[in-house]
């Protein structure tokens, strides 16, 4: 909920950039976006991305399988708790051997609608993100040949892969199966989406007022589109020096500097992917370093560091009420393994 960093003001408008992104291209190719008012900066989540059921079922099993990690203790679900909004309730996630990573794992819900993956956007697709996590020594610490071997040696996996993919168990097929499952973790039918589709009574008068404040203060400049974010980069600390505040990474002596680690450009220091706000009321703590324990605290930080202006207690409370209307369950109803 911040104004765009001057570096990005000349870029294409967010909605136009979103339409060219791989995730949204998939969305448009597979499921029409339900009608919503054309003048609204937020659009509803589609009902489905229409994944192959057999491949998505394989992906769900793999998502919960600790054998993808080097020590057979860490699965995707370890950091992406589907019962807690697909995110990690810890300030920073724990990787291999229980050692803390540098970042708070963002929600896997609606990740398919993001234009890039990871906080610094170093992966263009879900498949690429999965490939990097498996081999990251601070996360799963595996080698892909070892992962493929483990999966091939499991008779149930081997049979299911042979039925779903003509070339059976391969790295690419494991990545694709996992990504197929993750593409089912979209959350349509939030109360706010129903409101956008014309069900005026789906949200209360106070929640509608919160949405109005959200737009009036400028939060909508970065949090818009289908995913209410996730479609652009932004500097954290546009109006004030956020790193000086000291988040989890800073107190541990290892602050993350965002896209600067990829580009080496000073303009990219502390620039991160704008997170989606869908299901945000269920995904505390907040920000890349998990430095905001509550939604109310996160809103306060956004006003100070991104907007550079005060907001009344009433307006902040109304915005929090609006954000709660973005909550919904995934269409896949994850829980029991297939």
Image (tube, helix red, strand yellow):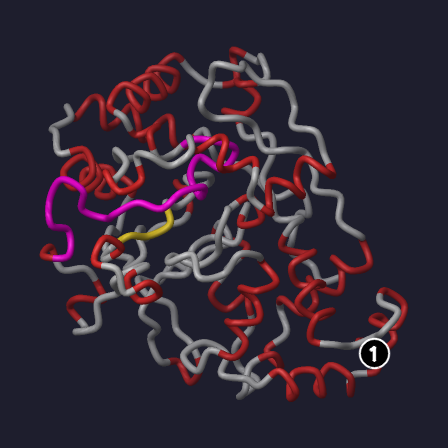
Quarter holding residue 178: bottom right
Foreground residue, 183 or 21? Answer: 21
Q: Main secondary structure of the magenta part?
A: loop
The residue carrying mark 1 is 158
Q: Nearer the viewer, residue 121 or 212?
A: 121
Spot occupied by residue 300 in the image (x, y as percentages of width and height): 18, 38
- Residue drawn at (49%, 37%) of the image: 17
The image quarter in which residue 288 lies: bottom left
Residue 220: x and y in percent read 35, 28
Q: Which residues are magenta?
A: 224-243
Where in the figure is residue 322, as x and y percent of width and height?
38, 26
The residue that appears at 18% across and 33% down in the rendered structure is 307
Instruction: Reply above or below: 335 against 136.
Output: above
Magenta stretch holds residue 295: no
- Front residue of 171 and 264: 264
Q: Quadrant of the C terminus?
A: bottom right
Query: What is the secondary structure assignment of the residue under circle 1?
Result: helix
309 left or right, relative to 194: left
Q: Residue at x 32, y 59 (%)?
A: 259
> Left or right: 313 with respect to 234?
left
Residue at the limit of the structure toward the front, as seen here: 10
Is residue 98 rendered to the left or right of residue 334?
left
User: Quick one: quadrant of the N terminus?
Assistant: top left
Q: How many marks?
A: 1
Asked if residue 231 lies left or right of residue 159, the reply is: left
- Residue 295 position, x and y percent, is 29, 41
How many C-alpha atoms fall within 10 Å of the one at disc 1: few (<14), some, or many (≥20)?
some
């Amino acid at each position: 909920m911040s104004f765009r960093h001057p570096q990005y003001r000349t870029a294409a408008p967010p909605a136009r950039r979103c339409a060219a992104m791989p995730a949204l291209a998939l969305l448009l190719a597979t499921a029409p976006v339900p009608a919503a008012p054309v003048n609204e900066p937020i659009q509803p989540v589609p009902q489905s991305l229409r994944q192959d059921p057999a491949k998505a079922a394989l992906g769900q099993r793999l998502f919960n399988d600790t054998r993808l990690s080097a020590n057979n203790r860490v699965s995707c679900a370890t950091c992406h708790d589907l019962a807690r909004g697909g995110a990690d309730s810890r300030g920073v996630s724990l990787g291999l051997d229980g050692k803390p990573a540098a970042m708070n794992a963002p929600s896997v819900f609606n990740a398919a609608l993001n234009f890039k993956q990871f906080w610094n956007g170093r992966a263009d697709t879900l498949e690429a993100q999965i490939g990097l996590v498996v081999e990251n020594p601070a996360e799963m610490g595996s080698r892909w040949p070892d992962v493929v071997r483990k999966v091939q040696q499991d008779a149930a996996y081997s049979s299911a892969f042979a039925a779903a993919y003509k070339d059976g168990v391969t790295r690419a097929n494991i990545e694709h199966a996992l990504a197929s499952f993750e593409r089912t973790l979209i959350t349509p039918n939030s109360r706010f989406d129903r409101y956008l589709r014309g069900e005026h009574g789906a949200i209360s008068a106070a929640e509608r007022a919160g949405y109005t404040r959200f737009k009036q203060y400028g939060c909508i400049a970065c949090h818009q589109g289908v995913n209410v974010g996730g479609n652009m980069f932004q500097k954290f600390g546009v109006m004030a020096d956020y790193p000086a505040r000291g988040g989890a990474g800073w107190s541990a002596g290892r602050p993350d500097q965002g896209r600067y680690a990829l580009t080496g450009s000073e303009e990219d220091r502390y620039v991160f992917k704008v997170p989606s706000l869908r299901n945000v009321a269920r995904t505390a703590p907040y920000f890349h370093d998990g430095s905001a324990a509550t939604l109310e605290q996160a809103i306060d930080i956004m006003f100070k560091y991104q907007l550079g202006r005060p907001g009344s207690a009433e307006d902040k409370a109304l915005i929090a009420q609006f954000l709660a209307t973005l909550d919904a369950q995934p269409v896949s109803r994850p829980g029991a393994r297939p």
